[in-house]
Image (cartoon, coloured by chain):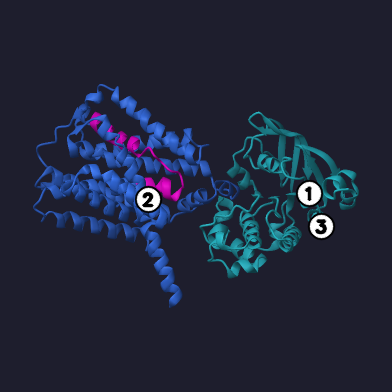
Chain colours: A cyan, B blue
Amino acid sequence: MSNSERASHAASLAIKDVCAGYGAVQVLRNVSLDVANAQTVALLGTNGNGKSTLMKCIMGMVRPSAGSIIATLDGVDHDLVGMPTEKIVDLGITLVPEGRRLFPRLTVEENLLLGAYRPAARSRIADNLAFCFEAFPRLAERRNQLAGSMSGGEQQMVALARALMTVPKILLIDEPSVGLAPIFVSRTIEKIGELKERYKLTVLMAEQNFNQAIRIADCGHVIVHGHLEFHGRTRAELSDNEMVKKLYLGA
Amino acid sequence: MSNARFATIALLAGVLLIVGAQWIQNDYFFNAAYTVLMYVILSTAWNILGGYTGYVNFGTAGFFALGVYSSIVLWKAFHPPLAVMIVVGTLVAALAGVGLGYLTMRLRGHFFAIATLALAIMLFTFVTNWDYAGGARGAYVIVPREVPFGFARYIRYLFSVMVLLSVASIVVARVVERSRLGRGLAAIRDDELAAECAGVPTLKLKLISTALSGGMMGLAGTTFPFFISFVEPVGAFDLRYAVNAIAMPVIGGMTTWLGPLIGAVLLGTVQQLVQVTISSAWNLLIVGLLLVGFVTMAPEGIMGWVFAWRRRRARRS
């Protein structure tokens, strides 16, 4: 399969007035956010502000109490609220979960094969595997190693590759930097940027490492206590903002 | 080895075992072997949910008793052939498995284990108060006078049926283990959230797993009334079924079909020997000691040793 074939889809995400929580605790309050086709949007915020909850809402793992989440894929609108997770993955929306969450007792290759569980991905499994090993040569060397025995940076690569095995159009990435050494953080971020450019993916990335995230983001939102407090349309706008300075740079 | 080839070899081994055993004069052998085979099925069944999928089920006795009691009720009502009771009892228990899966689909870990225990207690209460099935008094089953297929005694016939049912269970477990379904179950066991992210239909797979596991536990119980001829709820719901069904895969190894088989044959045989030489009161104590020993010293079970030995040998050569 050629790269242009992978990239021929238009995909965008429109989140409108989403409220969500766990039991009596409300985590998200009226969150509205757009991810345009082939853009990388950064969702910035420190721990406990609702980044992962928003990711889980999109993936159908947490059901919003109000609001809508619409994915537009090849000109067709899909309402994601109330849809089971496997259907959402089937549409071509995949989450790289926080903390990587590999299957530690399976090999690298088995981890990747599980990424291709959905029917559409299964028929092209050999192509996709070759493609992942091309994108991550290191994983080809280690295909028979147990995923749990790899370093954090390598595990993040497996997690990214596993997500790519589903042939996503929209890629959600929850805190790719968590628990990684600084050198691996910057490499991981570069890799995400590279993959996105190469395959024209639409990316929503939650991250608390502000300086790293804005290296590849087209625009960004700052989330504070479950509410989007600031929308930076460009990188410059984000880094100039007072709130960002206060939250991240200690000014 | 392909699935068809494995099934053929397993069936051949089963038939050989049945034919060979007919030379044994002592009928008590068949009583003991029946019990061991019953545990082979129970622990193989438990392992599909507990070992492959990672959901610990304490309610084995409940599913087993469903198989037992569906046979009793059918026998009282229609006197059907044994094959009919085997199929119906398995389906009833499989249905209960699906029900359990639905009710507990959001539970994990300890919570799931407690729910399974509760299910067994609920079924126990139900059966105890069901007069038609014997209620708390228990039910007698008169074993048919004529023995099918020319076996010398009914227990020899039952033993042969159990051999075939064990073969079937083991073949099913191995097919599951090596299929896409098995890989999906392993993903759920390792990390359910990640499995969902990868597009594994976790709920559907868990329901298949609880149905298969529950159904096979019921299967192990369908012939039981004809084995002991008098069934009362306390015996059918005995805790030792649940304990053994967990201990045997843990001791044998939970990642392959071979583990529960080894665990059941080993532990089941030891229990039978202790029962005739010392006392059946020692059985649970022995299980407890072995369990503590294995969990602390060999958490991967006997198959874990085998794998480690193989890895070492592969590295040396």
Q: Residue furthest bottom?
A: B317
Does dot 1 land on a helix, a strand or a loop? strand
Q: Depth check: give the residue in front, B58 or A1.
A: B58
Residue B83 is a magenta residue? no
Which contiguous range is marked in magenta?
A: B45-74
For the question of whether residue B298 can be seen, the reply is no
Q: Which of marks 3 and 1 is nearer the N terminus?
A: 1
| Mark 3 or mark 1, whichever is nearer to me | 3
Q: State which mark lies toward you, 2 or 1.
A: 2
B122 on left or right of B25: right
The chain under label 1 reads A
Q: Distance between the residues labelled 2 and 1?
A: 52 Å
Question: Is the residue under label 3 in contact with that under label 2 (CB below 8 Å)?
Answer: no
Q: Picture coordinates of residue B276 (x, y %)?
A: 16, 47
Residue positioned 60% across, 52% down in the render: A101
Q: Residues within 10 Å of mark 1 (few under 14, many from 20)?
A: many
Q: Nearer the viewer, residue B302 or A189?
A: B302
- Residue ID for mark 2: B292
**Is B12 positioned to the left or the right of B153 in the image?**
right
What is the CA distance from the residue labelled 2 to the residue labelled 3? Answer: 54 Å
Which residue in the protein does label 1 denote? Answer: A41
| Amino acid found under the numbered disc labelled 2 | Val
Q: What element carries label 3?
A: helix
Residue A215's mark?
3
Q: Which amino acid does label 1 sit on?
A: Val
**Residue B69 lies within the magenta run:** yes
